[in-house]
Amino acid sequence: MSRAIRMDLYKMFKMKSFYVILIVMAAVTLWSTGMIKAEMKDVDEQQSQSIEQEEEVVNVGINVGVSSQSDGKFTLMDFAFGNIQGKVIALFLVIFSVLFASSDNTTGYIKNIGGQVSRRSMLIISKAAGLLVYTILLFGIYLLVQLVSNGIIFGYMKLGNVSDLLSYIGLQIWLHFAFALICMAIAYIVKNNVFTMIVVISMCANLMIIFYNGIDKIIEKAGIEGFHMIKYTITGRIAMLSSQASGNEAAGALVAGTVVIVAMLIVGCAVFEKRDIV
């Protein structure tokens, strides 16, 4: 298993998309930070929606709202919360997840390695380990780039409440890792990168809200009121997690992420064990 994980990590760091996505993310972070400064006069109109508002109205597309502190200055926590809640980081993660998950099939490498392991499920677990490493790296690099961007654009670098920042980032890394495994499972089931990309990007852009609303209406007609499907999805958890998550909210996020991670690993392993390697 350790050899398979090392092999996938080696291949991950050799992928051009690994570096291209990080460079694009850094450029987008610097650009969006500059845009926030240019629109500071309208910042009051761009406040992040509360959880209650998110449940009632979810905008289609990737929307980022960043609010400043009482002194008018922005902290790293402010930008991190806005970009993560808006699923900007998730967008870069899902693109790489699909490319990474399907890399062995597209290069034909799976034909060589597939018959050399005792169980194919080991390859799924090693891919998942690689995605966990990438998720942590993605968040770490984003935070560093965002902090530097704040210094360049605003002339100061404030972290905000460090305890809240670390707690929030830790929970979001776990939720984003679960989201990455969803993308990996879809990639293995569908075996079509174009279709998979459309699906996962649609999830980041809240296009699935139409489907969720349909389920809400069906359940409401069944006599259950106040049900919101989006609250029970990983993308919903990512968007609705507060910057100061309470004990129950944090526990809920951890449980939801863990359940999805285990479920996606089971699905991925089952599909990979039964499917012919071609």
Image: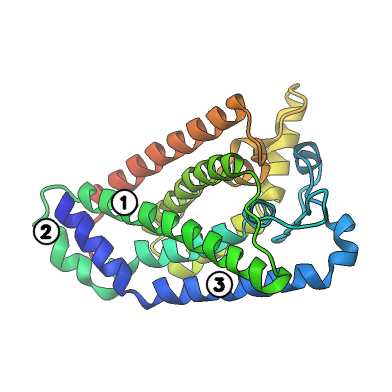
Is the residue marked by circle 1 packed among few (<14), some (14-19), or many (20+) residues within 10 Å? some
- Please name the residue that numbered disc 3 is placed on: 26
> Which mark is in front, 1 or 3?
3
Q: Residue at x 78, y 53 (%)?
A: 67
The amino acid sitting under disc 2 is Gly
Secondary structure of residue under mark 2: helix
**Taking 255 as reference, is 85 left or right?**
right
Tell me the distance, in whole angstroms, between the alpha carbons under discs 2 and 3: 39 Å
Q: Quadrant of residue 26?
A: bottom right
Task: Examine the rendered structure and indicate whether residue 148 appears above or below residue 52.
Answer: below
Among numbered discs 1 and 3, the one appearing first in the sequence: 3
Say whether residue 49 is left or right of residue 252.
Answer: right
Q: Earlier in the sequence, mark 2 or mark 3?
A: 3
Residue assigned mark 1: 129
State yes or no: discs 2 and 1 in contact (Cβ < 8 Å): no
Quadrant of res 158: bottom right
